[in-house]
Image: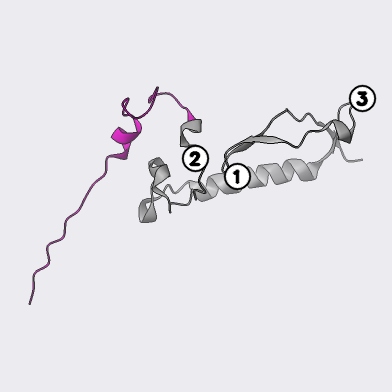
Amino acid sequence: MQHVKLTRIFVNVWAIGRDPACWKNPDEFYPERFEHDADIDFQGLNFELLPFGAGRRICPGIPMGVMSVEFTLASLLHSFDWNLPEGMTWEDVSMEGTGSRQIVSRSTALYLVPSLYK
């Protein structure tokens, strides 16, 4: 019978995320520091997002956060009739975006006027 020795490694993600040699202003909330050009899955399969955990130790709030954002957006879209501001036409709306694949923001702000269904 062979004896197998196992080694357990603990990674101090808190210290990595607050190392001033790696991050500028490590103690400030700066979510853009997690932007990457690659396709990164926030469900724990990529180690670029270690502060949120991985594998069995992943952040338990991720599903609730995703569901809350989707539900809130769906409720807003469903509850209101969305129109452009007065004097603006659909040709004036720019659909160009900037950013990486994971986080894309509009080049110009989109202004809409909500009105209740009648």
Nearer to me, 104 or 74: 104
Q: Main secondary structure of the magenta part?
A: loop
Between marks 2 and 1 in the image, the one whose residue lies nearer the viewer: 2
Residue placed furthest toward the bottom: 1
Give coordinates of residue 32: x percent, y percent.
51, 32
Residue placed at 64% from the left, 46% from the top? 70
Give coordinates of residue 22: x percent, y percent.
34, 30
- To which residue does mark 2 refer? 36
Nearer to me, 73 or 87: 87
Q: Quadrant of the N terminus?
A: bottom left
Q: Is residue 11 magenta?
A: yes
CA gap, disc 1 to disc 3?
A: 34 Å
- To which residue does mark 3 refer? 87
Of pointers 2 and 3, the one earlier in the residue sequence = 2
Residue placed at 43% from the left, 54% from the top? 45
Residue placed at 38% from the left, 55% from the top? 55
Q: Does residue 28 sit above or below 5 in this rendering? A: above
**Badge 3: few (under 14), some or many (20 or more) residues near its Cα, within 10 Å?**
few
Between marks 1 and 3 in the image, the one whose residue lies nearer the viewer: 3
Judging from the image, what secondary structure is the residue with disc 3 in? loop
Q: Which residues are magenta?
A: 1-30
Q: Is residue 52 visible?
A: no
Between marks 2 and 3 in the image, the one whose residue lies nearer the viewer: 2
